[in-house]
């Protein structure tokens, strides 16, 4: 396994350069694949089929909460390519809670 490059190194590469996509598995059967798209956001993809049932949802919420606590900032779960105004789930550090959008 190779060490992860710094964000500054990855983001300073030419646009057409290959970019690493680290994959983490917080719990068995649940993977998050990170993508270095900008220096302003943390982008990662998950396979919702891996998060079946309450146990899968709990694992994902714990993962989101751990990142939000570490960064002390709000994190949004949005459909791929959507802006935060379409977030369906988010972590709020002030209340240390996961919130769900109910108007859909």
Image (spheres, rainbow, N blue to C red):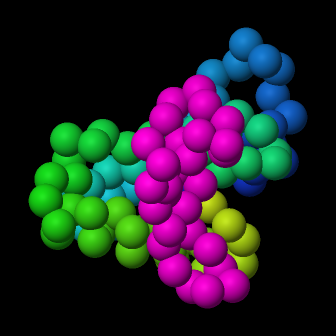
Question: What residue sits 39% from the left and 74% below the top?
Answer: 62
Residue 94 colored in magenta in the image: yes
Counting from the top left corner in percent of width and height, residue 6 is at 74, 53
- Quarter of the rendering occupied by the C terminus: top left
- In the image, taking residue 57 as reference, residue 32 lies left or right, namely right
Residue 48 vertical placement versus 69 (above, below): above
Observer able to see residue 88: yes
Observer able to see residue 44: no
Residue extending furthest toward the left: 53
Residue 22 vertical placement versus 62 (above, below): above
In depth, the one of 102 and 10 nearer the eye is 102
Residue 54 vertical placement versus 5 (above, below): below
Q: Which residues are magenta?
A: 76-104
- In the image, taking residue 39 as reference, residue 47 lies left or right, namely left
Question: What residue sits 50% from the left and 68% below the top?
Answer: 99
In depth, the one of 95 and 56 nearer the eye is 95
Residue 84 colored in magenta in the image: yes
Counting from the top left corner in percent of width and height, residue 4 is at 60, 53
Counting from the top left corner in percent of width and height, residue 53 is at 13, 59
- In the image, taking residue 25 as reference, residue 55 lies left or right, namely left
Counting from the top left corner in percent of width and height, residue 58 is at 28, 71
In depth, the one of 49 and 17 nearer the eye is 49
Question: What residue sits 73% from the left and 48% below the top?
Answer: 41
Residue extending furthest toward the top: 16
Residue extending furthest toward the bottom: 95
């Amino acid at each position: 396994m190779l060490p992860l490059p710094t964000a500054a190194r990855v983001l300073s590469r030419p646009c057409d350069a290959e970019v690493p996509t680290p994959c983490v598995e917080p719990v068995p059967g649940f993977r998050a694949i990170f993508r270095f798209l900008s220096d302003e956001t943390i982008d990662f993809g998950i396979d919702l089929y891996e998060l079946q049932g309450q146990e899968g949802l709990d694992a994902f919420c714990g993962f989101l909460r751990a990142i939000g606590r570490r960064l002390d900032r709000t994190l949004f779960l949005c459909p791929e390519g959507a802006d935060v105004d379409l977030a369906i789930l988010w972590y709020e550090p002030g209340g240390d809670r996961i919130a769900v959008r109910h108007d859909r």
